[in-house]
Image (cartoon, rainbow, N blue to C red):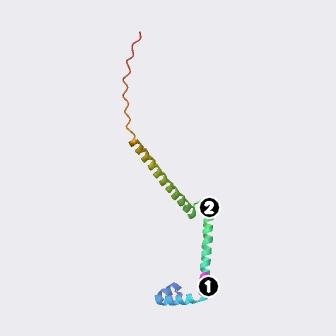
């Protein structure tokens, strides 16, 4: 059976209740030494994350695999291409509409008369 000392900090905090936990946290945060240690810990964690990100970028680069930054660059380029395609479609629609308007305003051309059938060849004598 586990004794009271065998429990971890989180189990003890859960048993203490919300009000007592808030009181303990306020006391801890009011301590300048604790705040300094917490700040240094967060700075170290962010530095470690930065070095891990750089190392992961290097590994992905060596394996010739795309990274998150590569995906973002590609997504930006794809969005620019989509915008260009939309602009081209709009311009093409305008040109087709102008051609349709010109064709409808043009007087109808008379249809060519069908050519009479060629005369039967005369037998040569």
Q: Secondary structure at mark 1?
A: helix
Q: Nearer the viewer, residue 115 or 38?
A: 115
Does the magenta-highlighted stretch encompass residue 49? no
Q: In the rendered image, is residue 17 in sight?
A: no
Range of magenta residues: 34-39
Name the spot of residue 117 as percent of width and height, x first. Answer: 36, 23
**Res. 123 mark:** none
Magenta stretch secondary structure, dominant: helix
- In the image, what residue occupies the spot 62% across and 64% down? 59
Q: Secondary structure at mark 2?
A: helix
Does the magenta-highlighted stretch encompass residue 38? yes
Nearest to N terminus: mark 1 or mark 2: 1
Real-space Cα distance between discs 1 and 2? 37 Å
Name the spot of residue 88 as percent of width and height, x first. Answer: 49, 51
- In the image, what residue occupies the spot 38% across and 35% down? 109
Name the spot of residue 26 as percent of width and height, x first. Answer: 53, 89
Q: Nearer the viewer, residue 29 or 10?
A: 29
In this rendering, the count of numbered labels is: 2
Q: In the picture shown, does residue 45 fall above or below 119?
A: below
Q: Badge 2, how many Cα within 10 Å: few under 14, some, many 20+?
A: few
- In the image, what residue occupies the spot 60% across and 88% down? 32
Q: Nearer the viewer, residue 53 or 4?
A: 53
**Left or right: 81 in relation to 57:** left
Q: Badge 1, how many Cα within 10 Å: few under 14, some, many 20+?
A: few
**Res. 36 mark:** 1
- In the image, what residue occupies the spot 46% across and 87% down? 18
Please give the residue where the numbered disc 2 appears in the rendered image.
61
């Amino acid at each position: 059976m586990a004794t009271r000392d065998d429990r971890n900090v989180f189990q003890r905090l859960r048993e203490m209740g919300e009000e007592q936990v808030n009181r303990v946290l306020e006391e801890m945060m009011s301590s300048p030494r604790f705040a300094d240690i917490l700040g240094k810990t967060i700075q170290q964690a962010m530095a470690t994350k930065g070095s891990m990100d750089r190392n992961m970028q290097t590994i992905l680069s060596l394996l010739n695999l795309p990274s998150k930054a590569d995906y973002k660059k590609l997504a930006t380029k794809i969005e620019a291409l989509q915008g260009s395609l939309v602009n081209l479609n709009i311009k093409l629609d305008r040109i087709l509409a102008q051609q349709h308007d010109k064709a409808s305003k043009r007087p109808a051309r008379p249809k060519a008369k069908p050519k009479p059938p060629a005369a039967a060849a005369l037998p040569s004598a």
